[in-house]
């Protein structure tokens, strides 16, 4: 997916430079002065696109595993006609790998016409489990032009480069979150030069990006950096099944735990300075072991879950939602073969524990298709995603305006390549809403889905302008030809999961 989308954005920039009708070239906003120097982007009749703008110094050498440092000013005009690079990562779910450690860049897209007044700003934090993904794979031109907004997409360090910890290492376990906050400070200093309203910044993200939004809601250092927030499929209490039956694992880890994890690494080094000298390829061998932001750090003093539960959050209008069938994308990754009906009790016990597993089997009756992976996915969706999303809405809603949505379009094309067949289809799987917000090359939408895309893009833009997505329902269901209220908690059995 990343490869296709990055190519699409790069092609758009190249096409514009090669002769697409332009809005005045240099005199029409191609060159913008930032606080560190001028950048030259791409201007067409519809949009302006600036790529690969550095917001922090390269996190290499002595800056590896340090909080982001200021970027050095440059002379002349910096070429911003190419998309940001892909941060170092291993290949996953069709995402291409990368060995690029110098990756703290962002992209900016705005409408081509001159702003009559400062435009709302939307800052996108990509997902990918904190180990993969990149900013340039999200083509936000339509989101910007349709909503007369400035959209910024941000890279941040991932995996072992972003969430590594070591005893005595300042910032342990939260470098990626610090990167995001440095990007938000760049936005505050510079987005006005791109026509954006520095007082009306919305942060939004999906999956790990949604969890990152939770982190900034809880982070004292983020005060004043944003005015609104959108959490997509990343509730602050998101969990995943652990290694033992019934065990749940939080995405947030105490700093001490991450530091001890780093101290146990066996890569031929006895200290951080030695680890800083290792090549990227060597560190990528342990990349996936560091996929959890640490709390108890300067940027994240408390767990975002604790902050949510106790009200220690920035009180801004927030939109919180998820997809109806989050776990259908994950279940076939750890249960690749069909699972007969007779295996449901044993599998449920292995996942949920003996007692709870028996109750799950009773509460999620077989649908008769001879493969219980879809029943298992429904139970895991409700427990780990949907009901924590419901709780996030309920708790945050006690302290600030909160709106809700559920993406429920069950016939979206699959955006991840080489996924095996799944009983009943993947439905509204995890990340299936993304092709409605961003332009995904090679992902065909039906006329009904294109109309739904128009609705979603408009709602997100309206929320960025006003803090109101435009519906009165506590939770709005979003499906082609079927947009309207839904009884979210009942549909996902949140009473059963003790999260009513």
Image (cartoon, helix red, strand yellow):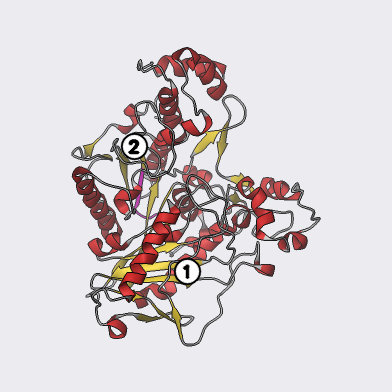
- For mark 2, what is the residue? 428
Where residue 66 appears, as percent x and y from the top left, is 64, 64
Where residue 352 appears, as percent x and y from the top left, is 53, 23
Where residue 482 appears, as percent x and y from the top left, is 20, 37
- Would you say residue 141 is visible in this rendering? yes
Q: Dot 2: what SS?
A: loop
- For mark 1, what is the residue? 185
Between 302 and 244, the one nearer to me in the picture: 244
Magenta region: 314-321
Q: Residue at x 49, y 61 (%)?
A: 155
343 displayed left or right of 406: right
In the rendered image, which quarter is residue 45 located in? bottom left
- Label 2, label 1: how many angstroms apart (C-alpha)? 35 Å
Q: Number of labelled discs?
A: 2
- Would you say residue 299 is visible in this rendering? no
Name of the residue lying farthest toward the bottom: 76
Seen in the picture, residue 178 relative to 77 is either above or below; the reply is above
Q: Dot 1: what SS?
A: helix
68 displayed left or right of 484: right
First in sequence: mark 2 vs mark 1: 1
Q: Residue at x 42, y 60 (%)?
A: 6
Seen in the picture, residue 147 relative to 327 is either above or below; the reply is below
Asked if the stretch drawn in magenta spans residue 460, the answer is no
Number of other residues with Cα within 10 Å of mark 1, as a class: few under 14, some 14 to 19, many 20 or more: some
Q: Indicate the quadrant containing the C terminus: top left, top right, bottom left or bottom right.
A: top left
Number of other residues with Cα within 10 Å of mark 2, as a class: few under 14, some 14 to 19, many 20 or more: many
Seen in the picture, residue 226 relative to 34 is either above or below; the reply is above
């Amino acid at each position: 997916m990343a490869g296709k989308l990055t190519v699409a954005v790069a092609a758009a920039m190249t096409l514009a430079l090669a002769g697409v009708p332009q809005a005045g070239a240099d005199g029409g906003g191609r060159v913008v002065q930032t606080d560190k120097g001028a950048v030259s982007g791409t201007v067409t009749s519809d949009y302006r696109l600036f790529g690969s703008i550095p917001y922090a110094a390269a996190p290499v050498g002595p800056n590896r595993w340090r909080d982001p440092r200021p970027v050095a000013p440059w002379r002349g005009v910096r070429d911003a006609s190419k998309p940001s690079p892909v941060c170092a990562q291993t290949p996953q779910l069709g995402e291409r790998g990368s060995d690029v450690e110098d990756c703290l860049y962002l992209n900016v897209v705005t409408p081509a016409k001159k702003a009559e007044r400062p435009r709302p700003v939307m800052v996108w934090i990509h997902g990918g489990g904190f180990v993969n993904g990149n900013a340039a794979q999200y083509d936000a031109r339509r989101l910007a032009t349709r909503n007369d907004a400035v959209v910024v997409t941000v890279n941040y360090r991932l995996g072992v480069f972003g969430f590594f910890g070591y005893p005595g290492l300042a910032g342990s376990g939260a470098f990626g979150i610090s990167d995001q906050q440095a990007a938000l400070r760049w936005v505050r200093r510079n987005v006005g030069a791109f026509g954006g309203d520095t007082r009306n910044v919305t942060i939004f993200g999906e999956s790990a990006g949604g969890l990152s939004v939770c982190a900034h809601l809880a982070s004292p250092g983020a005060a004043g950096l944003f005015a609104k927030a959108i959490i997509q499929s990343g509730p602050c209490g998101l969990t995943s099944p652990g290694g033992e039956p019934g065990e749940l694992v939080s995405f947030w880890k105490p700093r001490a735990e991450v530091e001890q994890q780093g101290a146990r690494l066996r890569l031929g080094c006895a200290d951080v300075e030695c680890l800083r000298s290792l090549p990227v390829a060597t560190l990528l061998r342990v990349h996936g072991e560091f996929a959890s932001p640490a709390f108890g750090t300067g940027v994240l003093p408390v767990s975002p879950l604790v902050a949510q539960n106790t009200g220690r959050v920035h009180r801004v209008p927030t939109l919180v939602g998820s997809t109806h069938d989050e776990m259908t994308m994950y279940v076939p990754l750890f249960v690749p073969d069909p699972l007969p009906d007779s295996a449901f009790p044993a599998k449920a016990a292995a996942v949920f524990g003996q007692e709870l597993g028996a109750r799950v089997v009773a509460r999620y009756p077989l649908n008769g298709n001879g493969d219980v992976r879809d029943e298992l996915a429904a139970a895991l969706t409700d427990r780990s995603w949907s009901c924590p999303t419901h709780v996030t809405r309920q708790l945050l809603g006690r302290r600030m305006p909160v709106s809700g949505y559920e993406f429920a379009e069950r016939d979206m094309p699959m955006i991840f390549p080489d996924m095996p067949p799944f009983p009943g289809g993947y439905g509204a799987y995890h990340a299936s809403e993304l092709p409605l917000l961003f332009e995904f090359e090679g992902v065909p939408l039906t006329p009904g889905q294109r109309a739904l895309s128009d609705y979603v893009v408009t709602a997100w833009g309206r929320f960025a302008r006003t803090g109101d997505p435009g519906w009165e329902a506590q939770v709005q269901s979003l499906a082609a030809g079927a947009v309207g209220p839904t009884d979210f908690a009942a549909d996902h059995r949140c009473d059963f999961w003790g999260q009513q």
